[in-house]
């Protein structure tokens, strides 16, 4: 409403922007969250699992302790050498 009040946009522009954002957001949610969660054997599910695996491997919490993830960048199994939850060793364990 502020954009309209300040005369930055007309009402049709505001409605079009809202609609475009709603549609794009729904599509993005579907391909990044909904489909991988409910259809893990799909291509999107496998891609997300691979990204999560790599994210954990590089220590992708950036130094913040989030949930059960500790450590930061460069402290994952890619650099340390022990995959941990995945089971297999990936180099020398310290």
Image (tube, helix red, strand yellow):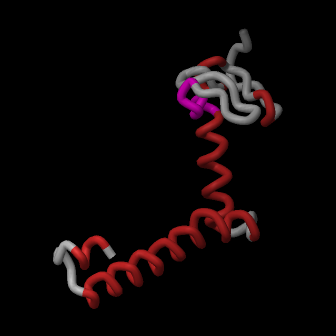
* Percent x, y of residue 69: 70, 31
Looking at the image, which residue sits at the far bottom?
12
Q: Answer whether residue 59 is magenta in the image.
A: yes
Image side of residue 1 versus residue 21, left or right:
left
**Magenta stretch, residue numbers:** 57-63
Location of residue 38 by image quarter: bottom right
The spot of residue 31 in percent (x, y) is 57, 69
Q: Could you tell me which residue is drawn at 69 percent across and 69 percent down?
A: 42
Residue 66 vs 77, above or below: the answer is: below
Residue shown at the point (73%, 22%) measured from the top left: 82
Corner quadrant of residue 36: bottom right
In-front residue for pair 55/78: 55
Q: Residue at x 70, y 14 (%)?
A: 92
Q: Which residue extends farthest top? A: 94
Quadrant assignment for the N terminus: bottom left
The C terminus, quarter of image: top right
* 11 w.r.t. 54: above or below: below
Q: Is residue 27 above or below residue 75?
A: below
90 or 3: nearer the viewer? 3
């Amino acid at each position: 409403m502020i954009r309209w009040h300040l005369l930055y946009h007309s009402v049709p522009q505001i409605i079009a922007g809202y609609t475009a954002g709603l549609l794009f957001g729904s599509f993005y949610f579907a391909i990044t969250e909904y489909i991988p969660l409910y259809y893990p054997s799909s291509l999107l599910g496998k891609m997300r699992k691979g990204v999560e695996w790599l994210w954990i491997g590089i220590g992708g919490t950036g130094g913040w302790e989030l949930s059960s993830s500790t450590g930061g960048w460069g402290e994952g199994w890619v650099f340390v050498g022990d995959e941990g939850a995945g089971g297999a060793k990936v180099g020398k364990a310290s």
